[in-house]
Amino acid sequence: MKSSSARGRRLDPDSFDQFVDSGAETEGLDRRDREILGFERQWWKYAGAKEQAIRELFDMSATRYYQVLNGLIDRPEALAFDPMLVKRLRRLRASRQRQRSARRLGIDLER
């Protein structure tokens, strides 16, 4: 995995683990899973496009990354590892799904 400098900070997946309590349950999650969750926890701290950081850190397309992330946040191990993050990501995903469905049906959710 490569690193990228941004606003004086480096994208370092090893630093992602520092945001999780040492007692967090990691069984069932491999290093990449933990790095993805760590990245989602703090990606906004870095300048540049998220898609570029995804490619540099994980060597995968943004499309593939989001497929992996969506599968990951459905896993109980991810919920045990970082409950607040996983619940937030699940809420965001559900909201986007509702918005897409409403658009297809011609419903305005703003009412």
Image (cartoon, rainbow, N blue to C red):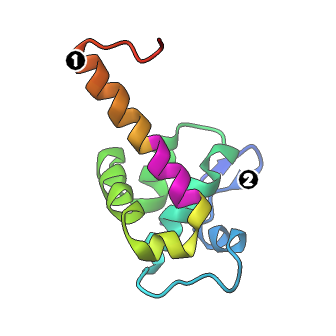
Kind of residue indicated by mark 1: Leu
Q: Main secondary structure of the magenta part?
A: helix
Residue of label 1: 105
Query: Percent position (x, y) of residue 45?
Result: 70, 46
- Front residue (pair 13, 85): 85
Please identify the quarter of the rendering in which residue 60 is found.
bottom left
Q: Is residue 78 above or below residue 53?
A: below
Q: Residue at point 52% right, 68% down?
A: 35
- Measured as percent of width and height from the top left, residue 65 is found at 36, 54
Rendered image: mark on residue 1: none
The percent coordinates of residue 30 (x first, y second) are 42, 80
**Residue 34 image position (x, y, % from top left):** 51, 72
Dot 1 lies on which element? Answer: helix
Q: Residue at x 27, y 27 (%)?
A: 101
> Which residue is nearer to you in this view: 6 or 89?
89
Magenta-drawn stretch contains 8: no
Decide whether residue 91 is among the magenta residues: yes
In front: mark 2 or mark 1?
1
Q: Are marks 2 and 1 in contact (CB under 8 Å)?
A: no
Q: Is residue 55 above or below residue 94?
A: below
Q: Amino acid at mark 2?
A: Arg
Label 2: few (<14), some or many (≥20) within 10 Å? few
Residue 56 in view: yes
Q: What is the span of residues highlighted in magenta in the rendered image?
A: 85-92
Between discs 2 and 1, the one toward the N terminus: 2
Q: Which residue is mark 2?
A: 9
Give the class, few, some or many, for how many residues have Cα within 10 Å of label 1's Cα (few <14, many ≥20): few
Image: 60 above or below 110: below
